[in-house]
Image (cartoon, grey):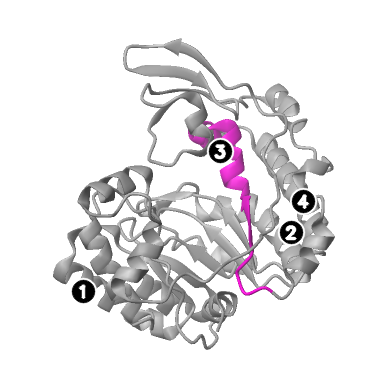
Amino acid sequence: MDSRRRYLETILFGKPDRIPFSPGGPRESTLKAWHEQGLPEGVDWFAHIRELIGIEPVEPGGPGVWIRHTMIPEFEEKVIEEREDSLVVQDWKGNICEISNQFDVTYLRSARDFTTRKWIKCPVENWDDWERMKARYDPNDPSRIPENIEELGWQIKDRSWVVRIPLHGPFWQLREWLGFEGLCMMFIDDHDLVRDMISFWTDYISTLLMKVLPHVNVDCVHISEDMAYKQKAMISPEMTREFLSPCYRQWNEIIKASGVPVYDVDSDGFIEELIPIWIECGINACDPMEVAAGNDICELRRMFGNRMAFSGGVDKRAIAKGGQTIRDEIARIEPVIKNGGFIPACDHGIPPDIGWKEMIEYCSLLAKATGWK
């Protein structure tokens, strides 16, 4: 069974030959630590670890499909002020923030590690800012989708690899414009502005999806939301249903009409109270199921059955401890692995406190639990 069929059979509660082996990916600082702990320089860590634990190499992939849904034009990246240990910068999204001077402003474009920043000003604070921001999101800009979309569709029609389209969800995108505190305040203080921004984003992404999905048989549309923290969502279920559900539902109509089988939402934090709303809106998969936030993959499976598939759910703290702790953690989730609809992985990016030795141990246990050994 190729990797595409294996992924779909797993996520859709089918009968895969084995579960995709997807332990999670390291941060930049994690890789640096691993090189100091025995990972050879100049090798692909994932290929190397598969060799070490005695499982097959990664299957070759191929071209994917992209939608450039971020702003055009971008803001100028610039340093506004140099301080003793930090820089005040404007990033490409128009945020003004303070960062450590070990980074430069361009690092924020695609940060490869945990990067703390102090938010000073976000690009949208009122209606006038919002009207100016809209002009940066023209769905008819030809650079937003592949020029050869029809040819690409034929090229990857009978592929063996998974093709996903990643997009920003409405909560994520409004937070990018308003900042987290600004967005939470706007949900209370200016319903009309929030509704206008969500409506705009809903239609904008809908237009882009309709330009791409008729030409390419995509396996998954993956929505980034990050709208929860420990034990609670960032807004109430009632507000989620009122403000965000119409967007999710509209996208679902397009996604399902195009034959895309997986509609996946990524949200850190505790998402138990959000899952019923996502199910109502047609979403059938979510990740990364952070354990420390309160998510219990076994209990969530009991609650939602095969209405929701999961990826993630392996406690990063258990991986770091290794030994009996990680053995117990893998044993804890094995019933859900066997039940289907679950691709186990580290429940977020792999932090540097997970050592190379512990990573090898975890991957060996995971490979056995998912049928690779």
Nearer the observer, 321 or 269: 321
Q: Earlier in the sequence, mark 4 or mark 2?
A: 4
Nearer the observer, 20 or 11: 20
Give the tally of numbered discs: 4
SS under mark 1: helix
Marks 2/1: CA–CA distance: 42 Å
Q: Position of residue 175 (x, y in %)?
A: 56, 38
Looking at numbered disc 2 in the image, what kind of residue is underneath it?
Answer: Gln
Mark 1, residues whose alpha carbon is within 10 Å: few (<14), some, or many (≥20)?
few
Check if mark 4's residue and mark 3's residue have beta carbons within 8 Å: no
Quarter of the image holding residue 221?
bottom right
Magenta span has 176?
yes
Q: Which mark is residue 328?
A: 1
Marks 3/1: CA–CA distance: 38 Å
Looking at numbered disc 3 in the image, what kind of residue is underneath it?
Answer: Arg
Looking at numbered disc 1 in the image, what kind of residue is underneath it?
Answer: Asp
State the residue position of label 2: 250
Nearer to us of marks 3 and 1 is: 1
Marks 4/2: CA–CA distance: 23 Å
